[in-house]
Amino acid sequence: MWNARPWTPELRAEREALSLLHWLRDQDKPQSEWLDAIAADQTLTEPVRQRALQFARDWNNATLLARVVPAL
């Protein structure tokens, strides 16, 4: 599936946040530790941090999957 949305700063933050969550998942970190890891990561910009926190809280939510899958 092709994503034809214009590449905006918001979409960049979303993409970076999702990449971070995938990395945390692939590191076998339990989901309960994701929020602390995101909050402690000083390399993240605030928009990326906020999106990552939002995604981490909603990771198992079917609505998140519906929102994220087209963005990939």
Image (cartoon, rainbow, N blue to C red):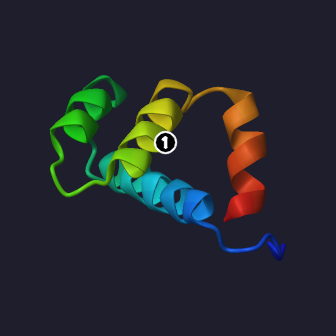
Vertical side of 26 occupied by 35: above or below: above
Q: Amino acid at mark 1?
A: Arg
Horizontal and vertical percent for residue 62?
Answer: 73, 30
Residue 60 seen from this side: yes
Is 72 in front, or is 16? Answer: 16
Is 4 in front, or is 45? Answer: 45
Q: Is residue 50 left or right of residue 61?
A: left
Vertical side of 27 occupied by 71: above or below: below
Question: Residue 72 falls in which quadrant of the image?
Answer: bottom right
Question: Residue 32 falls in which quadrant of the image?
Answer: top left
- For image coordinates 30% across by 29% down, the residue present is 35
For the residue carrying disc 1, how many other residues have a C-alpha within 10 Å: few (<14), some (14-19), or many (20+)? some
Horizontal and vertical percent for residue 58?
Answer: 56, 27
Horizontal and vertical percent for residue 53?
Answer: 41, 33
Horizontal and vertical percent for residue 33?
Answer: 24, 28
- For image coordinates 49% across by 58% down, the residue present is 13
- For image coordinates 52% across by 36% down, the residue present is 55
Q: Is residue 3 left or right of residue 54?
A: right
Q: Is residue 45 left or right of residue 52?
A: left
SS under mark 1: helix
Say which residue label 1 marks: 51
Residue 30 seen from this side: no
Number of numbered discs on residues = 1
Vertical side of 38 occupied by 43: above or below: below
Q: Quadrant of the N terminus?
A: bottom right
- For image coordinates 83% across by 75% down, the residue present is 4
